[in-house]
Image: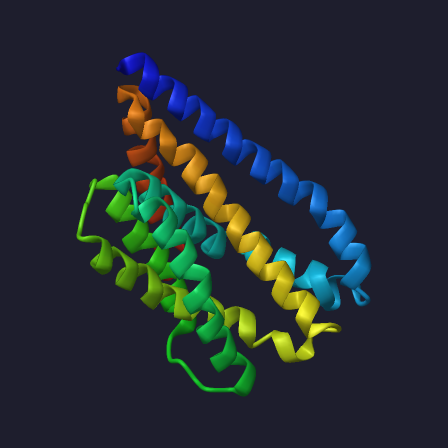
């Protein structure tokens, strides 16, 4: 039985690695096809926006970590729910609907999601999805406010959605280590680190 689980886990890790590699290989082609305005707009701007902001990075990785920690179906529900609801927040940002304390919400997302992993919190799947979705609105709004100024808004949207998905996959890949005792504590330690980063941005 243990050998079977190990084989399944190895297969899953290989598949996630292949998916991540595929994303990286697609980036240059899509970027050249859509960018038009370099970092000032288009695909590159959208792709780099989540990656260059560590408050975004740690929160999105935490979503993948928590999903992997909770197991199925959360391992795919949370990473799917986040970008879907993020699109709603992005739409609010595009049309100028104000959302108070967006930066505080983003920093708080890293704190809360990091603590969920660090403390091994396992709520019902619907509750976990709601928590993730609430924070997704703040992240989406931050992306959306920059969308109207992008050289190519469509390419910008593709960029930040792709970057978000890659960060989720990174979190899931690392989160699969929970299947082993040492990995279990490594994942929880990562949650502590994420919460600390969120605390730093909240105070800053």
Query: What residue appears at the point 42 percent right and 33 percent down from the top-left corner?
Result: 174
In the image, what residue occupies the spot 64% across and 59% down?
159
- On screen, residue 13 above or below 200: above
Please tell me which residue lies in front, 3 or 54: 3
17 w.r.t. 152: above or below = above
Give me the residue at 56% from left, 81% from top.
Answer: 94
Residue reaching furthest to the top: 3
Left or right: 162, with 37 as reference point: left
Left or right of 179? Residue 151 is right
Which residue is rendered at x = 31% and y = 52% of the image? 113
Query: Residue 85's spot in the image, x, y percent?
Result: 41, 68
Figure quadrant of the C terminus: bottom left
Seen in the picture, residue 113 relative to 8 is either above or below; the reply is below
Q: Position of residue 190 (x, y in %)?
A: 36, 37
Any part of residue 34 in sight: yes
Q: Considering the image in quadrants, where does the N terminus appear?
A: top left
Residue 108 occupies quadrant: bottom left
Residue 204 visible in image: no
């Amino acid at each position: 039985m243990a050998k079977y689980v190990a084989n399944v886990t190895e297969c899953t890790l290989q598949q996630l690695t292949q998916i991540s590699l595929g994303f990286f290989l697609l980036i240059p082609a899509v970027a050249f096809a859509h960018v038009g305005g370099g970092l000032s707009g288009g695909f590159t701007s959208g792709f780099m926006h989540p990656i260059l902001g560590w408050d975004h990075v740690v929160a999105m990785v935490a979503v993948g970590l928590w999903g992997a920690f909770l197991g199925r179906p959360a391992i795919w529900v949370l990473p799917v729910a986040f970008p879907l609801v993020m699109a709603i927040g992005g739409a609010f940002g595009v049309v100028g609907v104000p959302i108070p304390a967006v930066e505080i919400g983003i920093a708080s997302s890293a704190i809360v999601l990091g603590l969920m992993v660090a403390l091994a919190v396992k709520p019902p799947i619907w509750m976990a999805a709601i928590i993730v979705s609430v924070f997704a609105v703040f992240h989406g709004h931050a992306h959306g406010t920059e969308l109207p100024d992008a050289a190519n808004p469509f390419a910008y949207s593709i960029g930040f959605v792709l970057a978000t998905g890659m960060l989720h996959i990174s979190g899931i890949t690392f989160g699969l280590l929970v299947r082993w005792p040492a990995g279990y504590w490594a994942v929880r330690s990562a949650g502590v680190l994420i919460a600390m980063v969120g605390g730093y941005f909240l105070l800053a």
